[in-house]
Each structure stands twice: as structure tokens, then as C-alpha cells.
Image: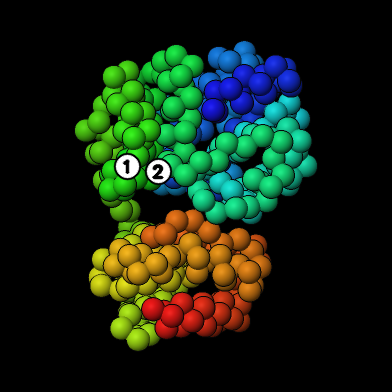
């Protein structure tokens, strides 16, 4: 159990300072996981726990923090001087942006907490890990919080609910533990309807333009009975991918990123039933090209830390189409 691991770490390392690291562009689940981790470690290890969000948090996460008047606990000193490190909601160091080097240098004092089924270098190397298939990382940490009898503030409870609702697609998927933990946050004063409202999509003008450009540039390819939509944008890849699925594509591939190449992939529910998953396709792509690929059945991503040139993008798209035709013709 996670709470036992945390107690063990406190005894073994006596950390005076801990750094909690999330994946880049932290979504509400990563955000809530980070806040709950700070609360737990501060209490159990009686130390100073700080947060870092590589490349900042997502625009949705920013809105949620502002609305709940919650402040991050950041300390911009050299990140390599902490006694212990905790990574939440990520499996691979590539997902940690600038913090990836620090984490790699400190595998011997690292706890990984994650709910993805994909394997990565963090799981292979971290001195401690707690990785379990769950709807959200917030559920794993919330469960530990519950067992440790720690009561979060009402605002933090609402943030945690938002984190769980976000990753579970508003409980489109659920587990007994997820429902138990959500009920704990409700009992402690979390505001469910506010959490729901915080997740409502309010798009700013740049996201609206990215979505429209994404449609405008989309190539529509038929592979057997399936419709694949492939497009390119420089930001909001995930939003564009969701849009293409809602517009009727069975598979949406959105290539983006500038300094590094990013791909967001979505698969329609009917395909998941046929065992075509976004996770497997992104993983296969990473095996071919390098970089990191992984995620979930319906939504997955790919990341390659290389300047995103036209040639590279063409190469990657070609490779995805190869993988897709093999996958789809198996059906
Ligand atoms: Mn998550």
C-alpha cells in the first residue's frame, strides 16, 4: 500500500526537503496528485515539500487553481539539491521535460506514483514505485490520504474531485476504489458540482483557431472500413484530436510541437471494442522511431525530443500509417 511505502521512505531517508514533479503541461489529475503529495509528505515526513511543474501547467489546470484560490508551492532553487523526489502521473522521464535530467540522476531517491499501464524508464529505475491500474493518479494518492487519516482543505477536496473526474471522463470509467476515494473527498467538503463546472471546456481564442486549423488541414484516409483523420497544429493537439473523433473519425492523429515533436492520438470507442488501442499504436511508433509512446486505450501520445522539421513529421506520419494498416487489416 502506498501509505506504507511513504512511511518507509520517511524512516529510511529522513528527508528534510522533497520535490514533487509532474509531467509537462500538467492536467488536473497531475495537478491534484501533486497537491495531495505535498500534503502527505509534509505531514508524514515532517519536512518541506515543494512542487515543480515542468513547462508549466495546462490552461485548464490554471483556471482551476485560480477559481479555487490555491497556490502552488514552488521553490525555484537548483532542483538537484533535494533529499528525495516524487514523480506523479508519468511513466517515462521524457514526459518530465527539463526535470528529466534531475530525475535520472536521482533514481536512488525516487518514488514513482502512477496509474498508467505503460512501462517506462521511471518504473524500471526508481528506488520506490507505486503503479496501479486506476482511473487517476489522484485516486491512488487519495486512497493513501484516507488511510493515513489526513483531512485536506475543502478546496483541495474539490481539486481532487476535478482530477478524478477529468481522468475518468466524468466517471465514464470507475472502480470501487475510485468511487470510495471520491466519496471521501465529498465527505470532507469537496464541491462536486463546482468540480464538474471547473472542467467545462472554455476555449480561448488560440485554442479555437487551433481546432479550426486542425480541421482545415486534416487529411482523411480510409483504411478498410475505418476513417483515419491526420492533421497538424502547433498547439492544443489533444483538443483537436477529440474534435476529429466527435466529427466522426474512427482514429485521429494530430502532429504538433515545435522544439520537440508531439503526437496526440484518439481512438473511437467502437475500435477499442475491436481491440485497436491508441496506446499500442503509439508504443509501436516509439519502438520504430525512438522517443516515448504510451497512454491509454482511447487516448495516447508520442513524444520525440527532436526539432520538429517537415521531414521528420512526414517520416513519422508515414510510419504511423504503416502501423495502422497492419493493425486494422488484422481485424
Ligand atoms: Mn492521470
Q: Residue at x 44, y 65 (%)?
A: 278
The residue lying furthest to the left in this view is 193
- Residue 115 visible, this orientation: yes
Q: In this rendered view, identify the residue nearer to me: 215 or 292.
A: 292
Mark 1 = which residue?
174
Q: Is residue 274 above or below residue 168?
A: below
Position of residue 272 in the picture relative to residue 2 (left or right): left
Q: Is residue 203 above or below residue 272?
A: above
Q: Quadrant of the C terminus?
A: bottom left
> Mark 2 or mark 1, which is nearer the start of the sequence?
2
* Rendered location of residue 269, percent (x, y): 30, 63
Q: Residue at x 58, y 15 (%)?
A: 44
- Residue 240 visible, this orientation: no
Q: Point out which mark residue 258 bears.
A: none
Position of residue 91 in the picture relative to residue 277 (left or right): right
Q: Assess disc 1: are there few (<14), some (14-19) or many (≥20) residues with their C-alpha within 10 Å of its C-alpha.
A: some
* Rendered location of residue 178, percent (x, y): 36, 35
Specify the color scheme. Answer: rainbow
Mark 2 = which residue?
135
Q: Residue at x 66, y 46 (%)?
A: 122
Q: Residue at x 34, y 35 (%)?
A: 176
Q: How far apart are the two marked residues, 1 and 2, measured between alpha carbons? A: 7 Å
Mark 1 touching mark 2, by CB under 8 A?
A: yes
Amino acid at each position: 500500500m502506498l501509505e506504507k511505502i511513504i512511511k518507509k521512505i520517511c524512516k529510511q531517508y529522513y528527508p528534510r526537503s522533497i520535490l514533487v514533479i509532474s509531467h509537462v503541461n500538467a492536467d488536473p489529475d497531475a495537478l491534484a496528485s501533486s497537491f495531495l503529495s505535498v500534503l502527505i509528505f509534509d505531514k508524514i515526513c515532517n519536512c518541506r515539500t515543494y512542487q515543480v511543474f515542468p513547462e508549466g501547467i495546462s490552461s485548464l489546470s490554471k483556471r482551476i487553481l485560480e477559481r479555487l484560490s490555491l497556490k502552488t508551492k514552488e521553490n525555484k532553487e537548483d532542483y538537484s539539491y533535494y533529499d528525495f523526489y516524487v514523480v506523479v502521473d508519468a511513466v517515462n522521464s521524457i514526459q518530465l521535460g527539463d526535470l528529466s535530467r534531475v530525475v535520472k540522476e536521482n533514481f536512488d531517491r525516487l518514488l514513482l506514483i502512477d496509474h498508467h499501464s505503460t512501462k517506462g524508464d521511471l518504473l524500471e529505475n526508481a528506488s520506490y514505485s507505486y503503479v496501479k491500474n486506476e482511473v487517476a493518479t489522484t485516486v491512488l494518492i487519495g486512497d493513501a490520504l484516507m488511510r493515513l487519516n489526513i483531512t485536506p482543505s475543502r478546496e483541495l477536496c474539490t481539486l481532487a474531485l476535478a482530477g478524478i473526474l477529468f481522468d475518468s471522463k466524468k466517471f465514464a470509467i470507475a472502480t470501487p476504489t475510485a468511487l470510495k476515494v471520491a466519496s471521501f473527498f465529498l465527505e470532507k467538503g469537496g464541491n462536486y458540482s463546482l468540480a464538474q463546472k471547473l472542467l467545462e471546456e472554455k476555449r480561448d481564442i488560440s485554442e479555437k483557431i487551433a481546432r479550426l486549423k486542425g480541421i482545415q488541414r486534416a487529411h482523411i484516409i480510409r483504411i478498410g472500413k475505418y476513417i483515419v483523420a491526420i492533421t497538424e497544429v502547433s498547439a492544443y493537439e489533444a483538443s483537436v484530436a477529440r474534435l476529429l473523433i466527435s466529427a466522426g473519425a474512427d482514429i485521429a492523429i494530430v502532429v504538433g510541437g515545435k522544439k520537440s515533436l508531439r503526437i496526440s492520438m484518439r481512438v473511437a470507442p467502437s475500435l477499442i471494442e475491436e481491440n485497436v488501442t491508441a496506446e499500442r499504436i503509439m508504443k509501436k511508433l516509439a519502438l520504430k522511431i525512438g522517443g516515448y509512446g504510451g497512454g491509454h486505450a482511447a487516448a495516447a501520445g508520442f513524444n520525440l525530443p527532436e526539432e520538429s522539421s517537415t521531414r521528420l513529421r512526414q517520416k513519422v506520419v508515414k510510419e504511423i500509417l504503416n502501423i495502422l494498416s497492419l493493425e486494422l487489416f488484422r481485424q
